[in-house]
Amino acid sequence: MTNHFVDYQHTDVFLMIGSNSAENHPQSMRWIGKAKRNRGAKLIVVDPRLTKSTVYADIFARHRPGTDIPFLLGIMNYAIQNNLYHKEYVVNYTNASYLVNPEFGFNDGLFSGAGEKNGRVTYDKATWQYQKDGETIKKDPTLKHPNCVFQLLKKHVSRYDIKTVSNITGIPEDVYRKVCETFASTGAPNKSGNIIYAMGITQHTTGTQNVRAIAMLQLLLGNIGRPGGGVNAQRGESNVQGSTDLAMLSHLLPGYLGVPNATKHKNLQDYIERETPASGYWKNKPKFLISLLKAFYGQHAAKENDFCFDLLPKVDGKNRTHMGIFQEMMAGNIKGFLAWGQNPAVGGPGASYERKAMEKLDWLVVVDLFETETAAFWHAPGVNPQNINTEVFLLPAAFSYEKQGTVTNSGRWIQWRYQAVNPPGEAKSDLWIADRLFKAIRKEYQSGGRFPDPILKMNWDYDIPGHDEPDVEKVAVEINGYEIGKNEPLDSFGKLKDDGSTACGMWIYTGYMAVDKDLNVPNCKRRSREDSGLGSFLKYSFSWPLNRRIIYNRCAADMDGNPWDPERALFKWDGNKWICHDVPDFGGGKPPRESGAAPFIMLPEGHGRLFASGPVDGPFPEHYEPMESPTENIISKQQAAPCANVFKGDWAKLAELGDPNYPIVATTHRTIEHYQSGAVTRSCPTLAEIGPYMYVSVSEELAKEKGIKPGDDVWVETARGKIKCKASVLPVVKPLIVNGRKVEIVGMPWCFGYQGIVTGPVANDLVPAVGDGNTSIPESKAFMCNIRKA
Amino acid sequence: MFAAPAAASEVQTAANGNLAAKLTKLKETFTVCSYCGCGCGILLYSDGERIVFAEGDPDHPINEGTLCPKGNGIIDVYNVVNRKHKRRIINPRRITKPLYRAPGAAQWQEISWDEALARIAKRIKKTRDETFEEKDKNGITVNRTTAIGALGSASLDNEENYLLHKMFRALGIINMEHHARL
Ligand code: SF4
């Protein structure tokens, strides 16, 4: 989230799309309620289902799964056509005025530079670049030049008029017009619009471009970096923000540093030269990387040996994302697997395939609280344990309040939580398990082995004499960063060096363990309600980076430093200095004209990108139908996302367009009672009791047509498999009119499995193994199925 | 949608001190909810052995004393009420000992931590050593194994994920993912 939950109180209009906050982020809903009550805020909810969130909505737009881009581009078109966008913001803070290569073009669903590789479109991005005069980017602040970003955007979105959007999405024209009017009203300089999203936006083959479309709409309306505004990805787990920051991901090192890649980085110098931009805050990347190497390899890391850069494994250019890994497992190329606190047997796309793939493993280690479906895959219903030769270890872990440490919430607040009780029986904290396992591995390597250096040289010293638990504060200080030779946690990543004199496990958290001088506790342990009036709560916990509560916050004021709305003045220039209610992210508070010249500090050009050459699939979002769709794409001849990652095998089997066997659109969702795959909550009696059944929501019309009554058992079938569950017949889902034809939609929660107090079939068994071209996130939110009475 | 248990101080006024007296005998611990990304503050009350009560922290800026059903049910992970004996017992579904399942076996068997860690370490070493690549076919130093996969977790603390990251990279693992991809 660019903003944070308490800040929602400042919003004028909420656009909630692909998120059901009332069930999945209930606190967010409470703050939305406050804004509605206290400032008359409006709430627009866009969802295929009538959810608990829609109950609070001023406008409910029921759209077809997989049509978020037309929905969002249509609002941009409306705002541009009716001159409702935030002109001053757009001219000064975005790249709208930049001139793009005159050869750039778009034709019938494809951008210029399209080529083909392995049946998939790949782009040569040469024409997607800015025009330059030497090093200076050419601009037209009048926004009139035909090659300027603004004109290109205007032309691109002009195809998404209200009628076309209505046809594709299934939202009636009058409802959609109302949405456009209401949300575009936040283009007024003194208004703030907040877009809230979650997995309904990301789990698509166009997931990255869906998010891009949200960010672009917010830039166009001047809603980023401001109280009550923002691009607010509400994250599903208590620490998914933290685990993402810490890069439990194949393509990253902690702090969003790209993982070394054998095809690009021979050595440290190569990495630094290729990955460090000349301008923007990332020009400090070498300081962050070398400090990380010092944290990892300690005294072994020296200038002469590239700070042990070579000890880090390099990726090979193969798809090593979740689905790529399970495909490799099925192929027998992965022999051993550690599933640490995650349950892919339920949560993975094509989950039945993932369970099958696990049978190919020599060994599997599961670390969890309960015997999850993943731990139990070898005795799942219908599986004969005798046929499975995988050795399985299940290690008992401690729960959140049976240990201590920090978690980072969706709004980037890093909070320390304390231990209430000891773990039951012999259960241990994950910190203890990681520490002891690594020591056991090291012991094995004492008697030799293949190149043990990366293992033996890893800096690993967290013992407290006389204590069983490793020193969690010591780990935290290492993440935070310190000067070598001193143990004081640094208070700013501005102090990190590239000469090996600082160590820092993850630069973006620097300061979280630094001591607050007034409160005399590390910043992440602060619990002071002191506040200067806008709800920034700067003395409560620590918000990365550098305790900033709203990022890109220079945009909260105009070029002269006046807040867009005096009532919500996050920053104001008083002629000599800034009056601050947040930590400025503009170079310690540079004067307004200077800081306003490049408010998006992480980007080399310093301006928000309405046009971006980063994504593999285009500088602008474009509508493509989901890989399985009930209709032809009416906006271009390119039916589905041209750069999507389609995996191999049965789990990626797709229904053809128009296949009469699978005429119904399916989507998945969560419920308030269960957490993710249900691995924890289905083993808790209170929650199991209030969320006992797996079900599929069908419309009243469809139920009538198929002779299904509420509570009947039904089969839900896709090209990949089928599941049996109960039918819920309510106006939760309704058929939509799409391109002139009636389309039925069904929805299923994905929190059930075969373990726990309450059990049910796994909805993810039905999801196809197709992923976004940029990220390989699976398309769990839109696929085709059929339904019949069991 | 919200159940907002009153803070201990309010209960004292409302119930003339009765419940508060009971609460004051308990240890109060601040925690942050383990479920969604909202980050609600929760106060847990325990008698040293069992957690008897959880309430939203009234002083927490985000949840201001309120909790949703998941947060309200958070003590169940540790202990549940045994209806027959009317007392709290450890959630019987929790795994409380390391378990091992041999190839083809139909049952788990309990093993000690030492045994479990040593055996796992041997499996990891064997797989790593059999598949480790120091250089790729172009002669670039890669120091990796493609034969081990690992998932970290959005349910773990930051410090735990950090140690996992260090361990996995030390082993040369490049098949490393977690919830955020899904
Ligand atoms: S109590 Fe509910 S809203 Fe709060 S963090 Fe937990 S799951 Fe989220």
Image (cartoon, rainbow, N blue to C red):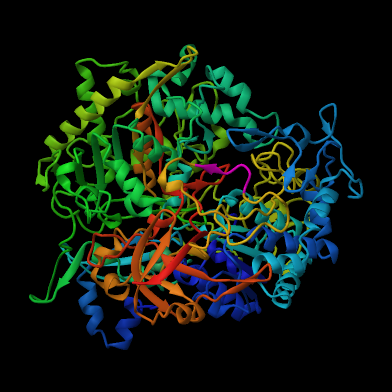
The overriding secondary structure of the stretch rendered in magenta is loop
Residue A297 shown left or right of residue A158 in the figure = left
Residue A12, by quadrant, is bottom right
Can the viewer see residue A506?
Answer: yes
Q: Is residue A643 within the magenta segment?
A: yes
Vertically, is A239 above or below A190? above
Q: Position of residue A7 (x, y in %)?
A: 58, 64
Can the viewer see residue A560?
Answer: no
A127 or A300: which is nearer to us? A127
Residue B45 shown left or right of residue A57 in the figure = left
Measuring 60% from the left and 54% from the top, which residue is drawn there?
A2
Residue A595 shown left or right of residue A510 in the figure = right
Measuring 77% from the left and 46% from the top, which residue is drawn there?
A591
Q: Is residue B144 within the magenta segment?
A: no
Vertically, is A641 above or below A753? above
Quadrant containing the C terminus of chain A is bottom left
Measuring 28% from the left and 49% from the top, which residue is drawn there?
A374
Stretch of the chain drawn in magenta: A641-646
Q: Position of residue A640 (x, y in %)?
A: 62, 50
Q: Position of residue A630 (x, y in %)?
A: 58, 62
